[in-house]
C-alpha cells in the first residue's frame, strides 16, 4: 500500500483561494481589505527573494500590501520608529520584519516592538504565551506549526486521542506544534510526546505514533521501520543534500526516508512540496484574521 | 522497598532559609531588600488566609512587604490605577493580586496590567511565552511548576533523557511543567509526554515514566500498578475526600494512591506536605529574582 500524499502545494492553493474569497466579501461588506507591510532592511538576495514571494502572494489574494525597503545602515531607533508608525496605522493589520537584520540592530528588540495584535508571524512572547494558554486567548498561531495542523486536519486524520510524537524542540516548530496538538479543541486533543537529541529510545517513540511530526533538520533521521503502519507522517525537514548539476538547484531531502516511508505510512508529506509551501499561506491567513478582528467581522 | 519521601515542607524550609540569607547579603551590599505588594480586594475568608500566609512568609525572609487591602466595591479603574502605581514604584519588585476578584472586575484585564517584570506569579502571557521560548528569555517560572522542578532536582532525580509523563494539561500545572521539563538545561532535557482526559491508554503511559507528574485533580486516579518500580512520583492533586470529625479539618488525598504507590516508587511526594508547601517558597524566590535583576545583582 502506498501512502496518500498530503500535498502542501495543493492545500496552499485551496487556502489562498479561500482567503481571496473572504477578502472580496470583506471589501464588499465594509469597503476595506487586509493591510500587510513587509519591512526589508538591506538587499541580501535570500531576503529579497523571500520578501518578493510574500508580496506577490499578498497581492494575489487582494491584500493592500506595502513593501517598505530600508537601507542597510538604518539605525535601530529609526527602525523602531517605523514599526511604531505601522503599529498606529489602522489600515495595517500585519507587520513583517524580514530577518536577519544587520548586526548593529537587536533582532529581538525590533520584533518585540511590533504590536502583538499585528504580529502575524506570532513570534512575540505575548503570542507565544497566548498559544500556550490556548482557547480564546489565541490570536495568531506561528505559521509553520499552523500549516502542519492544517495539513493534518485537511488530510482527514483523526487527532482526538491520537498519539502524536514530535521530533525536535525548536521554538519555530517543535515546541509550538507539540503544545497546539495537546490543547483542547478541534484538530488537537492529542496525547503528545516531544522527543529530541537527549531522548534515549527515539525509535520506540516513533513506532507508537499515530501522527509523527519530524522537525529535527537531520536528513533521513527517521527510518522507515520506525513508522507505525498507517500513520500520518509530517516531515518538516528541508535539508540540502547536494546540487543538481544540470539545473544548478539544490537537492532537498526531508528528515524522513520518504521513498521507503511512503510504503508504510497511511499519509505522508513530501519534501519539497509538503510543509514548506504552507507557511506563507498561514501568514496570509493570520493577516486576514487580524483584519477581521480589527474590523469586528468575527 | 519503601520509597524515599520528598517532603515539600522540608524543602520549603531550606529554600526560605536560602532566600533569607540572600536578602541579608543584599541588604548589606546595596542597602535594599526585595519589595512585595499583596493586593487583596474584599474579605473572603479563604483569600484573607492565603494573603496572610504570603505576608507572613515574606516578612520571615526579610522582604519589605506591603499588604494593600481594598474594599470589595473598588472600581476596576481604581484597581488598575493602583497596579500602575506599583508598576512605577522602584522599591516594589513583585505585585500579587489575590484571586478571585469581585464579579464587576475583569480578572484578566487586571492581571495583564501588571508589569511582566513584576509578575511574580508568572501568569501574564509575556511570562508564559518566555517560559516556552526558554533559555535567557525566562524571567519567572510559575510557582507550582517551579516548585515541582525544584523538588525533582533536590531529590537527586536524573532528568536528562528521563521519560517524564505529565498527567493533566492545566495552565497552572500540566502545560507549563511539561514545557519546562522538555527544555534544554539543568533539571530538564527530558522526553516529555502530556496525557489527559482524551488519552486512550493512560496506564501504558504512566508505566513507562521515570518521572510521573500527576496533576489531574482526581483522587486515586493513578493506580499503584501503573508506577514503574523506582520511578519518581510527584503528586500535585489536593482533593478533599471528607472531613475529620474530631478536628473539623478536611481530609486531603492526592491523585495517586499514596499508601500503595510508595511501596513501588523510588521517590514520592506525600499529600499534604508535598507540592503544596513549595508554591509559596517559589513565589518568594521569584520576588528575590526580580529584585536581583532590577538591582543589577545577577
Image (cartoon, coloured by chain):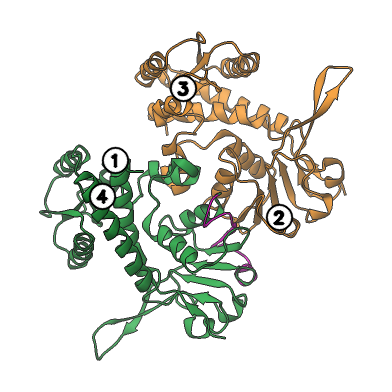
Chain colours: A orange, B green
Q: Position of residue B93 (x, y in %)?
A: 25, 46
B147 or A270: nearer the eye?
A: B147
Q: Numbered disc 1: what chain? A: B
- Point out which mark residue B26 bears: 4
Of the two numbered discs 3 and 4 in the rendering, the one whose residue sits closer to the viewer = 4
Label 2: how many residues lie within 10 Å, few (<14), some (14-19) or many (20+)? many
C-alpha distance separating marks 3 and 2: 37 Å
Q: Which residue is mark 1?
A: B294
Above or below B18: residue B256: below
The C terminus of chain A, quarter of image? top left
Above or below B39: residue A59: above
Residue B180 shown left or right of residue A199 in the figure: left
Q: Answer whether labels 1 and 3 touch (C-beta < 8 Å).
A: no
Tell me which numbered mark, 1 or 4, is placed earlier along the sequence: 4
C-alpha distance separating marks 1 and 3: 31 Å
Q: Which residue is mark 3?
A: A95
Point out the stretch of residues depicted in magenta: B185-205
Q: Which residue is mark 2?
A: A210
Q: Numbered disc 2: what chain? A: A
Q: Position of residue A263 (x, y in %)?
A: 86, 47
- Residue B208 lies within the magenta run: no
Above or below B209: residue B286: above
C-alpha distance separating marks 2 and 1: 47 Å
Q: Is residue A45 visible?
A: yes
Label 1: how many residues lie within 10 Å, few (<14), some (14-19) or many (20+)? some
Question: Is disc 2 on the same chain as disc 3?
Answer: yes
- Residue B187 lies within the magenta run: yes
Residue drawn at the location 35% of the way across and 73% of the way down: B9
Of the two numbered discs 3 and 2 in the rendering, the one whose residue sits closer to the viewer = 3
- State the SS at label 2: loop
Q: Position of residue A283 (x, y in %)?
A: 55, 28
Going by the picture, which residue comes out furthest to the front? B28
Amino acid at each position: 500500500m502506498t501512502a496518500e500524499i498530503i500535498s502542501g502545494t495543493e492545500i496552499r492553493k485551496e487556502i489562498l483561494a479561500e482567503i481571496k474569497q473572504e477578502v472580496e466579501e470583506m471589501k464588499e461588506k465594509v469597503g476595506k481589505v487586509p493591510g500587510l507591510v513587509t519591512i526589508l532592511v538591506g538587499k541580501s538576495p535570500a531576503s529579497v527573494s523571500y520578501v518578493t514571494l510574500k508580496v506577490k502572494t499578498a497581492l494575489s489574494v487582494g491584500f493592500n500590501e506595502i513593501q517598505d525597503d530600508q537601507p542597510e545602515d538604518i539605525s535601530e531607533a529609526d527602525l523602531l520608529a517605523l514599526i511604531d508608525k505601522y503599529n498606529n496605522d489602522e489600515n495595517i493589520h500585519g507587520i513583517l520584519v524580514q530577518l536577519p537584520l544587520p548586526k548593529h540592530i537587536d533582532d529581538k528588540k525590533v520584533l518585540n516592538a511590533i504590536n502583538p495584535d499585528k504580529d502575524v508571524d506570532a513570534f512575540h512572547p505575548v503570542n507565544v504565551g497566548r498559544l500556550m494558554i490556548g482557547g480564546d486567548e489565541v490570536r495568531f498561531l506561528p505559521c509553520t506549526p499552523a500549516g502542519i495542523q492544517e495539513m493534518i486536519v485537511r488530510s482527514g486524520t483523526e487527532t482526538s486521542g491520537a498519539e502524536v510524537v514530535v521530533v525536535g524542540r525548536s521554538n519555530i516548530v517543535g515546541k509550538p506544534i507539540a503544545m497546539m496538538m495537546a490543547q483542547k479543541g478541534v484538530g488537537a486533543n492529542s496525547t503528545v510526546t516531544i522527543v529530541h537529541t537527549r531522548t534515549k529510545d527515539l525509535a520506540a517513540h516513533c513506532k507508537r505514533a499515530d501522527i509523527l511530526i519530524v522537525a529535527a533538520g537531520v536528513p533521513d533521521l527517521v527510518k522507515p521501520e520506525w513508522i507505525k503502519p498507517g500513520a500520518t507522517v509530517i516531515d518538516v525537514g528541508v535539508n540540502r543534500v547536494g546540487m543538481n548539476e544540470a539545473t544548478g538547484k539544490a537537492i532537498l531531502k526531508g528528515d524522513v526516508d520518504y521513498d521507503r516511508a511512503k510504503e508504510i505510512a497511511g499519509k505522508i508529506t513530501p519534501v519539497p512540496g509538503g510543509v514548506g509551501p504552507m507557511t506563507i499561506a498561514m501568514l496570509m491567513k493570520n493577516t486576514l484574521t487580524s483584519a477581521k478582528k480589527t474590523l469586528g467581522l468575527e
